[in-house]
Amino acid sequence: MRIISSKELKEEGLDKLLARGKADLSSIVSTVRTIIDDVKKEGDKALLRYTEKFDKVRLTQAKLRVSENEIKEAYTKLDKKQITALQKAADNIAGFHKKQLRAKWTMQNAEGVTLGQVTRPLASVGAYVPGGKASYPSSVLMCAVPAKVAGVRKIVVCSPPSKDGDVDSALLVAADIAGVSEFYRVGGAQAIAAMTYGTSTVQKVDKIVGPGNVYVTAAKLEVNRDVAIDVPAGPSEVLIIADETANASYIAADLLAQAEHDPQAWAILLTPSETLASAVNDEVNRQMTLLSRINIIKSSLQKGLIVTVRDIEEATELANMIAPEHLEIQTVAPDEVFSKIRNAGAVFLGGYSPVSFGDYSSGLNHVLPTAGYAKIYSGLSSLDFVKTMNFMQCSKEGYRNLKETAVTIAEMEGFDAHAKAVSIREEKEE
């Protein structure tokens, strides 16, 4: 990792850092549109063709959907400890996401006037889960459990098959624990098209969530006219604010944990302590040699940064500009620093709160805005799977309290029918 000053960062690399992760999708849009159009026209036939082309797996129509027997068999391929961990993670995710929901509220802003809002779940949701070469059961839980908590009745998961045509057992067990209705071994842009427009096998859904590669991202953006989607996803990232009281080995481990995701992942430390900066760099180099994904980590850390800042105040200013997906605060008073943070996907306070807990076990959702989108987007939550309806009920007294204001403004705007719709009620009473 490079150690640079905040002055050097602002002069040499801040613009690049702020523009990180915003992939140019123009080169693949034409291909993605063709895939989407083919799925719309040909349905399952296109899914089978593209699965063979991209995943090198020849399936039949009957094999697109994972069977109940396959799910039952998946449990036999995991040990008890693994199943318990998935169940515990699901329980924690459910507990946290239940707190986010508000079923109904009412208020009175005038005598006799009741206003309120009720929450209703979406009817169906599709979750895309990366697969094939790797397995991410945590992503299944993060997408499906909040939807189940919100009351969504139909939850569909699409994930690409492995080279032998199977789906990883951990994904299937996680899906079953989370209450997934249907699981399809379909990946890429073709999976997004199938969930958007439906095929003979795959029924269309109201919203699609979950991370994926650039083809999945491009496809989600293309179909957004016809289906709701979540926040655009890019390479994972962590930014750590730390002072001289922080533990260098903890920080190094957290930077490496993020770097092992992807060669495009970002790992950044902001600290006013040059001593800590040097110690963290040494720890990164030492710990890296003990890790299995060292080649990915080395590639990622070529752009990793340890930035020495004037003080913690400057660190918070930079953090708000960068708007990281994950923000760790390892300082003597993390709550005080947190009070000044405006932009971050999720925040982890203190030396014993690693991002890994947010990824797997605490109950926080790890589907978060990257590439600076934390300035305008929130992480995935149970609120992403509901919609709200406003309502109003007026008594005669309430009608009289609102009448004059409504009629006056309607007449100002030249809408006499609107005004009449109000006044006629008084006329009929007379």
Image: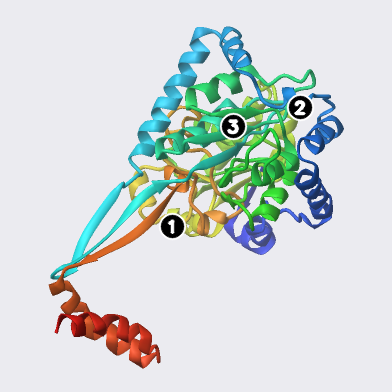
Mark 3 / mark 2, whichever is N-terminal: 2
Is 88 on the left-hand or right-hand side of 225?
left
The residue depicted at 58 percent of the width and 57 percent of the height is 6
Q: Mark 1 and 3 residues: CB-CB less than 8 Å, in contact? A: no
Q: CA distance from mark 3 to mark 2?
A: 39 Å
| Residue 307 in the image: above or below residue 398 | above
Mark 3 or 2: in front is 2
| Location of residue 129 in the rendering, given as x and y in whole percent from the top left corner | 63, 34
Q: Position of residue 97 (x, y in %)?
A: 39, 38
Q: Are the residues tagged 2 and 1 within 8 Å (C-beta)?
A: no
What amino acid type is highlighted by mark number 1? Answer: Arg
Q: Name which residue type carries label 2.
A: Gln
- At x 13%, y 73%, the residue is 397
Q: Position of residue 391 (x, y in %)?
A: 30, 61
Disc assigned to residue 61: 2
**Residue holding disc 3:** 257
The numbered mark, 1 or 3, whose residue comes first in the sequence reads 3
Q: CA distance from mark 2 to mark 1?
A: 49 Å
Above or below, 204 relative to 163: below
Provide the residue designation for mark 1. 342
Q: Please tell me which residue lies in front, 285 or 324.
A: 324
For mark 3, does the 10 Å Cα neighbourhood hold few (<14), some (14 to 19), or many (20 or more) residues?
Answer: many
Q: Secondary structure at mark 1?
A: loop
Secondary element at image label 3: helix
Give the SS element for disc 2: helix
Q: Is residue 6 visible?
A: yes
- Residue at point 39%, 90% (across, down): 413
Q: Amino acid at mark 3?
A: Ala
